Image: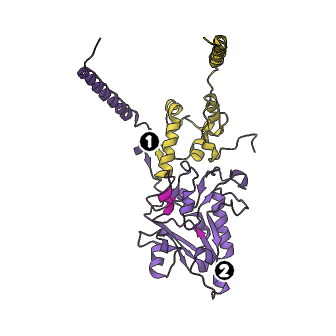
Amino acid sequence: MSISRRQFLKIAGASAIVGLGGISAIDILQRGQFEASQVSKDPKALVGKRWAMVIDVKRLDEETMKRCRDVCHRIHNVPDIDKPKEEIKWIWKEDFEHAFPGQEHEYMGEDIKQLPLLVLCNQCDNPACVRVCPTKATFKREDGIVMMDMHRCIGCRFCMAACPFGARSFNWRDPRPFIKKENPEFPTRMKGVVEKCTFCYERLAIGQRPACVEESKGALIFGDLEDPNSEVSKILRSKYTIRRKSELGTRPSVYYIT
Amino acid sequence: MYDGWKIIIGIIIFLGIATFPILYDLGKAAPPPPEPKIDTPEIKKMVEKKCVEPKSLMKIEHMVMLKDWRDWYVREGRSIYIAADGKQYNISLSNTCMKCHSNKKDFCDKCHNYAAVVPYCWDCHIEPKEEGQL
């Protein structure tokens, strides 16, 4: 049996159309088992457009800082690893010269050098870590939170190189043996992923403020920058505040009153 | 054919090894499919024993559902799932699924081991403590 070029092209064309059409038909028919419309936000959830934090350094002391750090690390299953090169931290105490490099000078008094400073992920509005992440494991949510999707993190640590604040920690080893008491309601991490503060997205989702804010007795203030009536907006309007390394243009959302 | 017998012996050995798994199982019945247990205290308490969606769907599609739940919660921040019957559930593996199915060994692991699939959920998510475990 012979077949002309014209016939061959006709058959090939027709079967390509049937094949492609069939594939997309299957795609359309198969969707809808778990439609996106079946999901909603919790009505109790705190809703904001750009979450931010103001840290009132004058109201901080050693004990408050320790309580904030402990509650955060406890509820988020942050391991307590004693080696500085492997340690994992979401919120921690920092010296003035390291938190605000370039602002220090040799005539500064000891009390300013020793200011009780709490630092955490700045939840930047223009986050360098999000730009460099090759898998979109870290991304900016609608409400401004720079979020981590641990399911996608491949541990390349580009984000750690990009972050000017050292806010990210890498799991060099399985963190589970270093967690004193696990909180079963929150996942741990595994070896080979990067983690950081997430502004307690899991608490916002059920209508609670971040744990450190609750624990700080008013030294940390949390709110929405886009809402002119929020407490943070009022403070930023009326008081002099500074941000860490704002000259780099990442537009941090954590402000300090010193 | 040079060294023909060497080649033929080689082919016979190769065929023997390659077909061994099939020949070994020939005539044997497949191992019985596992029956995951749903006799946890939480499920016993339920008047109408019902999962988030019908059992038939959960059996085949639970992995698709968990993947969708994961993306809705982590990436889109939507935390409530409304089932086909209108009931609402919190999207959470540890706090919704495992609150009822607190017997990971007799529930999840049974089928996963049978089918030789190794989901990595438990690398991070904390499994409920079962009896005899620390």
Q: Disc 2 designates what residue?
A: A114
Residue A142 shown in magenta: yes
Mark 2 and mark 1: Cα distance apart in space: 57 Å
Q: Percent position (x, y) of residue A61? A: 66, 76
Q: Which chain gets the yellow colouring? A: B
| Residue segment shown in magenta | A119-146
> Foreground residue, A111 or A214?
A111
Contact between marks 2 and 1 (CB within 8 A): the answer is no
> Foreground residue, B57 or A122?
A122
How packed is label 2: few (under 14 Cα within 10 Å), some, or many (20 or more)?
A: few
Quadrant of res A172: bottom right
Q: Percent position (x, y) of residue A214? A: 59, 67
Looking at the picture, which amino acid does disc 2 mark? Gln
Residue A32 shown in magenta: no
Looking at the picture, which amino acid does disc 1 mark? Gly
Quadrant of res B114: top right
Q: Residue furthest front?
A: B2
Subunit of label 2: A
Q: Disc 1 designates what residue?
A: B86
In the picture, the quarter occupied by the N terminus of chain A is top left
Q: Nearer the viewer, mark 2 or mark 1?
A: 2
In the picture, the quarter occupied by the C terminus of chain A is bottom right
Q: Is residue A125 above or below residue B94?
A: below
